[in-house]
Image: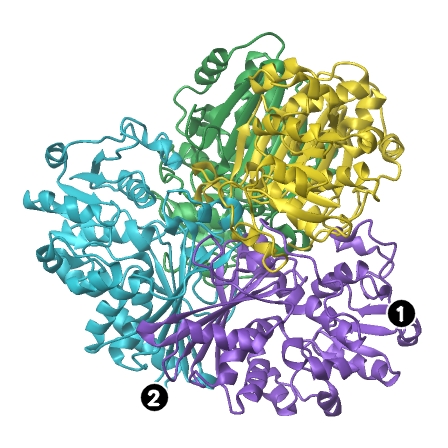
Chain colours: A yellow, B green, C purple, D cyan
Amino acid sequence: MRVGIIGASGYVGGELLRLLLIHPQVEVTVATSRSLSGDFLHRVHPNLRGMTKLKFTNPKPQEIIDACDFLFTATPHGTSAKIVPQFLETGLKIVDTSADFRLHNPDDYEKWYNLTHPCHELLEKAVYGLPELHRKEIRKASFVACPGCMAISAILALAPVVKEGKVEKDKIVVDTKVGSSGSGAKPSLSTHHAERYGVVRPYKPAGHRHTAEIEQELSALAGDGIKISMSTHAVNMVRGILATCHAFLTSPWTIKDVWRCYRGFYGEEPFIRFVRDSKGVFRFPDPKTVVGSNYCDIGFEIDDHANRLVVMSAIDNLVKGAAGTAVQCMNLMLGLDEQTGLEQPGLHPV
Amino acid sequence: MRVGIIGASGYVGGELLRLLLIHPQVEVTVATSRSLSGDFLHRVHPNLRGMTKLKFTNPKPQEIIDACDFLFTATPHGTSAKIVPQFLETGLKIVDTSADFRLHNPDDYEKWYNLTHPCHELLEKAVYGLPELHRKEIRKASFVACPGCMAISAILALAPVVKEGKVEKDKIVVDTKVGSSGSGAKPSLSTHHAERYGVVRPYKPAGHRHTAEIEQELSALAGDGIKISMSTHAVNMVRGILATCHAFLTSPWTIKDVWRCYRGFYGEEPFIRFVRDSKGVFRFPDPKTVVGSNYCDIGFEIDDHANRLVVMSAIDNLVKGAAGTAVQCMNLMLGLDEQTGLEQPGLHPV
Amino acid sequence: MRVGIIGASGYVGGELLRLLLIHPQVEVTVATSRSLSGDFLHRVHPNLRGMTKLKFTNPKPQEIIDACDFLFTATPHGTSAKIVPQFLETGLKIVDTSADFRLHNPDDYEKWYNLTHPCHELLEKAVYGLPELHRKEIRKASFVACPGCMAISAILALAPVVKEGKVEKDKIVVDTKVGSSGSGAKPSLSTHHAERYGVVRPYKPAGHRHTAEIEQELSALAGDGIKISMSTHAVNMVRGILATCHAFLTSPWTIKDVWRCYRGFYGEEPFIRFVRDSKGVFRFPDPKTVVGSNYCDIGFEIDDHANRLVVMSAIDNLVKGAAGTAVQCMNLMLGLDEQTGLEQPGLHPV
Amino acid sequence: MRVGIIGASGYVGGELLRLLLIHPQVEVTVATSRSLSGDFLHRVHPNLRGMTKLKFTNPKPQEIIDACDFLFTATPHGTSAKIVPQFLETGLKIVDTSADFRLHNPDDYEKWYNLTHPCHELLEKAVYGLPELHRKEIRKASFVACPGCMAISAILALAPVVKEGKVEKDKIVVDTKVGSSGSGAKPSLSTHHAERYGVVRPYKPAGHRHTAEIEQELSALAGDGIKISMSTHAVNMVRGILATCHAFLTSPWTIKDVWRCYRGFYGEEPFIRFVRDSKGVFRFPDPKTVVGSNYCDIGFEIDDHANRLVVMSAIDNLVKGAAGTAVQCMNLMLGLDEQTGLEQPGLHPV
């Protein structure tokens, strides 16, 4: 199976390369970059030095179509919407990691992204690429929109309890902490090491765009409108997201109930782990312990004092939050074992 | 004015030393440590090398009484309650930085600290040492209980809006991120660099003891019971706290209203700064920008989508969160200019 | 092939587990820990949660012998010397990761470790486990002493030029920078996050014990006594070593000469990469780019001004510096493809 | 005394502002920035919020001359040489923090900076601003060139032993580790947090320009040509430099001799501290313990095995390495107490 990556010089592109170069059932044939065309991959992905002779190229669409059986588009928001249609027409299966096709309702693009979506018809066709919620559709899909990293962490944390209808629907706080790779590979003053190191910087206290995806998915589960109160913070690490979700219970619940609800919802999901230990250092989810892996760790606590449920989820934003989920979707779309190429544990300590 | 520090080898003790050694109107005459008695201060406070010939000692109470006019007790919780009374009896003015005298209601010690408080009568005498709320009482006090670091950040963030009665009283989420110096100077596996570096570790999703102080102070301001939903996270920095406070508005409010409320409440407070810029890297409070200073930076945002007010506050947990506030209280208790010895700006970048 | 790990709760033990649990040709049957016997591996190796049902045990020697075909001893220095002999006698093949069997000359233990070695005869039998130098002997060995992490980085950097005899033999400076995982898993004040974060701490300006191994191996290559001037520094990362080696040329040399020398020496070594680029961010070796991988990146520069050759090498101290090299040795000893289970690239960015 | 800072938006400019805004005997009247003219200082120096009403301006030279009695030029290399002469002509005293006037020999600019120096006559006039070596000249100077940060750390470490003539003159290795603030305030891919975090990046294994200054000053002390073998590394911190200097002894020396030599050379220098303890965490110099202070910590070790002297020095690159030394020079030039405004200890832990 020949696979191409459009936009391979960014961090999601680099992570797709890392996973796909050792994936036993695909071969990466195309890795595009306009600015780095002709350069070795290790120019910007130094970890891949010596892994491949592949170079960045800047091919014409037809060359991509000829060289690939499957396509990842890791292009910036706005670009994907322009380039995806031509490839889809040729029957290529595609996973897009941009935000361009995640929302089903075109009005949401007006509201959250302040733009008129150029191809409404594809919004209907695109499957929201979260296997834990849409495995069946993904298996049959030819076009999958990979969710946003913040959205994945929040949705996986909240899906079970929202579906069970146990929390107030309009007062769900999602307080998110994210590492610097989430800002992408383009330097700016706000990502300058001397300015970014050691911060706890609230970069979007309200109005984060991923709110739209989260509400779309959770409302569908709840069968009713869910309102998310999201605030996002940059913290001093490179990889990882912790989403701390605070929700208020509509009726009493015990920890045992929470366990039952979450175990029931996720069953044998291969990449969901529950973390709630009574001893040891890592008693709740922590992004540190999933670095490099495709796991989403979920933990919870009940605050009797305030009638509150706290659910925490930790992911590596570049793996389960992007490239890992994208590969998981590819595996499903190609009929492969879903875990293929994603079995590596994280690193610890790191 | 001769000043003593009981428990000078910990991080709060060290920070008191840093501030007091260059304070123009006091002289540190006693710095106690049982384990380091006879050693130079720089054995554990390497920044103070060359600043003083003072050594740690382990004096008897009478020696302390003879050598000091003012006392800081930076002793562990539980120890302060045992040693403070004997010093107070002699007329020494004291600021205690432990939790032993922060709560007025003895029952709260049973509930939150699981202990029977040994000296109820002192609970009534102790003034809660937050100058922004209790300046007048502190000026007249002979005994002040310095607030907890998490409490300071949360109370200063929420006091104005809680007093104005604009938010739902039982659904206030305080999501706190704190650096490793907040865990004290004693090593453990959870603070081992390889385990603690790069984390976003939810160490107390519910039930943090500072909740009690926060509710005590905010309820007094509200004239009604306030319930705080607090979750605390360890993040990858040494100094600093960011408290992100999420509250739900009981009636519409604009950013202009918030500005009016907060400016009105704090007036010309010397150590409160408002941070809400439309450009630049630091548009909201960030603990990085207060490292080494006594400032509490406060910022806010209104989330119309979810009818939510987000208030963020940033402090250096060892300065405004402990030693700086303690010195501020001392200045007030001694009739000095409140800002004496606390005028240094923070370091940036750091 | 059933594999056991004696001392599996430390960082080298954890890394062996990470590599071996997904190694396609072995099965981990025993992971011992006295203090954690009965506990899941993820109690201290949280990355391994969900990867295995295996628990720590504290078996008797005979139980280990019965359950394993191959043994890794990741025990503290001193302990390995006591326990290895009984296992070797039964024909078990062993890789020991302690320092106990790395030096051939018992006198060196007196000199550098200040101890009388308890089993001289095994010192002769143990092969120094650096495949790049001793591949043939390792293939035939039943007992391999895995080198020290600092030693690996220094030896691989210097071997080619020392063999070629181009530098002054008694003035080779090795200035090493290492992450906190190199201090092991046991907490202490010097590894306490608040004390260890942000340091560049010279912890052994002279007299580091790995000097002995480095001189042993390089002197053998040179056919003459080599003297190493080593200084080691703790820096603010968890994984990784950079060795900067400064040597003075005995006669003029060009960069082209250096390339020829190093390419000639290493040929097609699977885990040696040369890093010397004229553009990009990572123009020389950097431990950041090998995190999680078994690569040793080597780069060099000639300083005409001072007649100096600078050789830099970067490794992940837990992989190529310990567990990865140990597995590489195991593969050789078992007649497997040397790269099996070690093909994963590092993570970037991380 | 009215003081102006030309180029106040960079990190050295910001640090000058931090020190001068609380300096009791000067008033900052001008802080120039072309790009930020009209903006508050806290736009890029967030620590200074609330400290001053001063704004960045972009005044004409005459306006600067009218508003200031003393000038700091913190302009980029090349710019200082263009703007300094016009100010000097008016009798303004100046400390320049660029490299433009540090070298006395114009040929050195050709060799190390690859440029023809535009004003040779000023090279003779400029005093090299290191008070520990040139206090008397600085006191009488009207124009001082503040040394480079790497140069300060290396010169202060090596001056005593070089003057005593105890080490081989052409084999002195200076292995330097520096924080990210040393790269200045301008973002680039190499300083992008995700790329710069966690590195030990050899960014100049040979040919660093500060070599020229170091050799100039040490050769003058030695009365003979000194050759420096310098390699510089970027490490994961914001502030700080550790220089590890390796030199080979020409005849036997003991630690006692080293103590005598260094104590004799530095006498009562206010900002030199010796760090060589037998216990505790910080037994040798570490930049962590000088953050925010003007101290240069110096320590040493003798390596009998290799006949080597190791001298380590730690500074905060923005304080003793730039703005602090510049203010120290200003104090001397103005006849003030040299320590004025520089008495603050560093922060610990930080």
Residue A192 location in percent, x, y? 45, 42
- Residue B58 in the image: above or below residue B328: below
Whether residue A297 appears in this view of the structure is yes
Of C214 and B79, nearer the camera is C214
Locate residue D27 relative to residue D124 in the image: left or right. Answer: right
Residue A292 in sight: no
* Marks 2 and 1 on same chain: no
- Please tell me which residue is depicted at 22% across the width and 40% down the height of the picture: D6
Residue on which disc 1 sits: C59
Q: Residues within 10 Å of mark 2 (few under 14, many from 20)?
A: few
Residue D140, quarter of the rendered image: bottom left
Amino acid found under the numbered disc labelled 1:
Pro
Q: Chain of mark 1?
A: C
Cα separation, mark 2 vs mark 1, equals 56 Å
Badge 1 element: loop
Image-based side of B199 in relation to A26, left or right = left
Residue in the foreground of this view, choosing between B250 and B271: B250
Spot occupied by residue A202 in the image (x, y as percentages of width and height): 54, 31
For disc 2, the marked residue is D251
Farthest residue in the top direction? B251
Q: Within the image, what quadrant is residue A204 found in? A: top right
Is label 2 in a helix, a strand or a loop? Answer: loop
Query: In this view of the protein, which residue sits in the foreground, D162 or D6?
Result: D6
Q: Viewer-proximal residue, C268 or A100?
A: C268
| Residue beneath the point at 61% across and 62% down | C316
Position of residue C243 in the picture relative to residue A53 (left or right): left
Rendered residue at 80%/47% (across/down): A340
Give, as a three-letter code, the residue at label 2.
Ser
Q: Is residue D198 left or right of residue A144?
A: left
Percent across and percent down for residue D160 are: 28, 73
